[in-house]
Amino acid sequence: MGTLNEYLGFVEKVDKRIRNEKLTELLARAELTHRADFASKSESEVPEKLAALHAELAELADEFQIRVSAPVQDEEHHTWSVCFTDSQGATRCIDWTLASSPEFRQMMSSTRRSRNFWRPPFLVEYAKTAVAEASAEEEEADAEGAPSPGSVEVRAETKAAKRGARIPREPVEKQTARELFAYIVEQGKKDYQVQRYKGLGEMSDTQLWETTMDPEHRTLLQVKLEDIVEANESSPR
């Protein structure tokens, strides 16, 4: 998740110039990293990687809602570029100026480190071992006997969640890295509820047992006067 989040951060920076995240992700996979990728051996020959990119953009023009122009050569700098016009009428170019920018280089560096992972579609599969472990944990919990005091509701909710976990789930397909990241975050938040309280007096007995009173899960930290003094000295003023 950290690698994916880092990659999306770089994509977002480059996308401030492109204004089309799907197209920006396509650029990350095009491997336009050197000036030679934008320069040709002859004046009339479009560089191989740029020609391939132009063909792919032309094929995806309707999906991206863009109008792609023919590759153009900059006679002064002897490099080629591919420009397109977006749905707002703005013209944006993919050229060596873009590819040599710090944000583009960062995106390409992140792409190279995990090159095999960023090619859509992305398929999310649910491990069978997780289903088996959920079932085993429930059986073990039932074998222990009566629930701990104050935890009846908690155990009931946990059992319901584990029963749901035993149901086989079909693989999920996502078309972009952004959709993949959003789906993983969404799934990670399931069965969890985040609440904030000013003090313990605002919590119910069940919540107090889960977070504070249960000896098996609580964490007790001893705070000394010396710790407060040290914290005051180390904090910026």
Image (cartoon, rainbow, N blue to C red):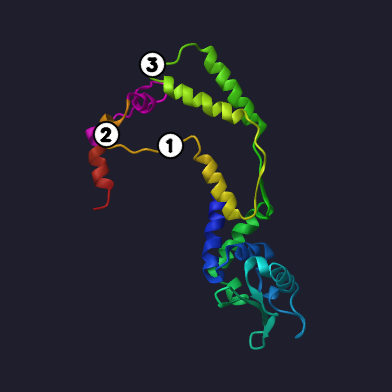
On screen, residue 41 versus residue 142, left or right, reads right
Provide the secondary structure element on which disc 1 rests.
Answer: loop
Amino acid bearing label 3: Pro
Location of mark 1 (residue) = 193
The local crowd at label 3, few if under 14, some if 14 to 19, many if 20 or more residues have their Cα within 10 Å, is few
Q: Nearer the viewer, residue 21 or 167?
A: 167
What's the CA distance linking mark 2 and mark 3? 22 Å
For residue 101, what is the image quadrant?
A: bottom right
What's the CA distance linking mark 1 and mark 3? 22 Å
On screen, residue 51 versus residue 142, left or right, reads right
Q: Which residues are magenta?
A: 205-226
Q: Nearer the viewer, residue 101 or 142?
A: 142
* Disc sitting over residue 199 in the figure: 2
Mark 2 / mark 3, whichever is N-terminal = 3
Location of mark 3 (residue) = 149
On screen, residue 216 versus residue 75, left or right, reads left
Q: Position of residue 102 (x, y in %)?
A: 54, 68
Residue shown at 63%/30% (left/top)? 167
Provide the secondary structure element on which disc 2 rests.
Answer: loop
Mark 1 / mark 2, whichever is N-terminal = 1
Q: Position of residue 145 (x, y in %)?
A: 49, 11
Name the mark nearer the viewer: 1 or 2: 1
